[in-house]
């Protein structure tokens, strides 16, 4: 590169930094630099925003086989939130009875212990969200009519799927990325169950795929195993995934 071009480039960058400072568009730099997320609020429910509602199913709610404590209590909030979006996508954990993650298919392995699967570490879960059972159905309080599409995941017996985007091998896609990109979605808001597993992995993949990613505090709750919550929230911070009440962002 010739010197003159370099100088122009430098000038351009300095100008961009200054104008971004003056217009207050420094939220990317400030985000997660301290406790408060200094997100610059903007209109939402725009055509470039989508809400992803993760796994609000009976088995993840009280009474279910892999219940999240108070899991049902976020549903009224989710119902309110989803009315504000033009695009709402649901994920649904959807397993065959002989699924690799089930304790019943790993005799001698304790629930919440891990096995080494071909794609890496796999947590052993109690059987849950077996397709065509009550446990796999969405909770009856969830207003499913708002869903534009439902992405099912985890239906291959030999591989689990936490994320709404990729199965646990990190390469097998669910199709959600294509759906969002075709619709020109730029920003995703994520809520649902469970914060430390399926919400977590959905958010990490969303961010990696280039979407601005917000996880809505108060509309998600964790399974909470060991340090899973602490690790999840640290991961959000490190990756630039926003986590806070909806009013912080809109
Ligand atoms: C989930 C464990 C196993 C979740 C799904 O939805 O967070 N967790 N399958
Ligand atoms: Zn599952």
Image (cartoon, rainbow, N blue to C red):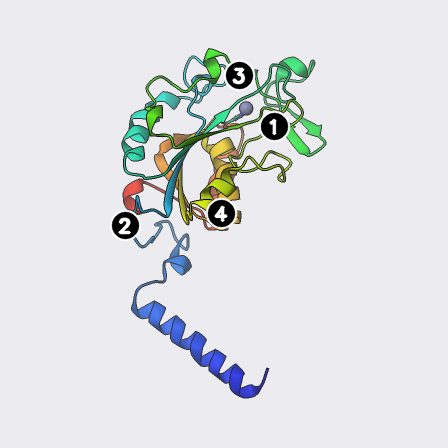
How many neighbours does mark 4 have within 10 angstroms: few (below 14), some (14-19), or many (20 or more)?
many
Q: CA distance from mark 3 to mark 2?
A: 38 Å
**Would you say residue 70 is visible in this rendering?**
no
Query: Mark 1 vs ligand 2: CB under 8 Å?
Result: yes
Depicted 67 relative to depicted 47: above or below: above
Residue located beneath label 2 in the image: 43
Q: Which quarter of the picture shows residue 217? A: top left
How many neighbours does mark 2 have within 10 angstroms: few (below 14), some (14-19), or many (20 or more)?
few
Pick the quarter of the image with the N terminus.
bottom right
Residue shown at the point (51%, 34%) measured from the top left? 164
Which callout, 4 or 3, points at the residue further toward the start of the chain? 3
In the rendered image, the residue lying farthest to the front is: 182
Q: CA distance from mark 4 to mark 3?
A: 29 Å
Q: CA distance from mark 2 to mark 1?
A: 36 Å
Which callout, 2 or 1, points at the residue further toward the start of the chain? 2
Residue located beneath label 1 in the image: 160
**Would you say residue 30 is visible in this rendering?**
yes
How many neighbours does mark 1 have within 10 angstroms: few (below 14), some (14-19), or many (20 or more)?
many
Q: CA distance from mark 3 to mark 1?
A: 14 Å
Mark 3 in CB contact with mark 1 (< 8 angstroms): no
Q: CA distance from mark 1 to mark 4?
A: 21 Å
């Amino acid at each position: 590169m010739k010197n003159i071009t370099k100088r122009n480039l430098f000038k351009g960058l300095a100008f961009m930094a200054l104008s971004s400072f003056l217009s207050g568009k420094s939220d990317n730099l400030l985000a997660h630099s301290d406790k408060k997320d200094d997100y610059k609020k903007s209109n939402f429910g725009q055509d470039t925003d989508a809400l992803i509602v993760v796994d609000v199913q009976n088995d993840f709610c009280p009474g279910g086989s892999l219940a999240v404590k108070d899991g049902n209590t976020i549903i009224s909030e989710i119902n309110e939130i989803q009315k504000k979006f033009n695009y709402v996508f649901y994920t649904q954990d959807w397993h065959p009875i002989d699924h690799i993650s089930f304790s019943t298919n790993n005799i001698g392995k304790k629930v919440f212990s891990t096995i080494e699967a071909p794609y890496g570490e796999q947590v052993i879960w109690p059987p849950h969200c077996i397709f065509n059972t009550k446990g796999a159905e969405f909770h009856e309080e969830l207003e499913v009519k708002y869903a534009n599409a439902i992405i099912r995941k985890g239906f291959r017996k030999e591989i689990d799927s936490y994320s709404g985007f990729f199965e646990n091998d990190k390469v097998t896609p669910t199709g959600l990325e294509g759906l969002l990109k075709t619709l020109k979605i730029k920003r995703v808001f994520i809520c649902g169950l469970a914060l430390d597993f399926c919400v977590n992995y959905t958010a990490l993949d969303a961010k990696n795929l280039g979407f601005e990613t917000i996880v809505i505090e108060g509309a998600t709750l964790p399974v909470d195993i060991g340090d899973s919550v602490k690790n999840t929230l640290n991961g959000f911070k490190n990756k630039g995934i926003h986590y806070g009440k909806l009013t912080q962002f809109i």
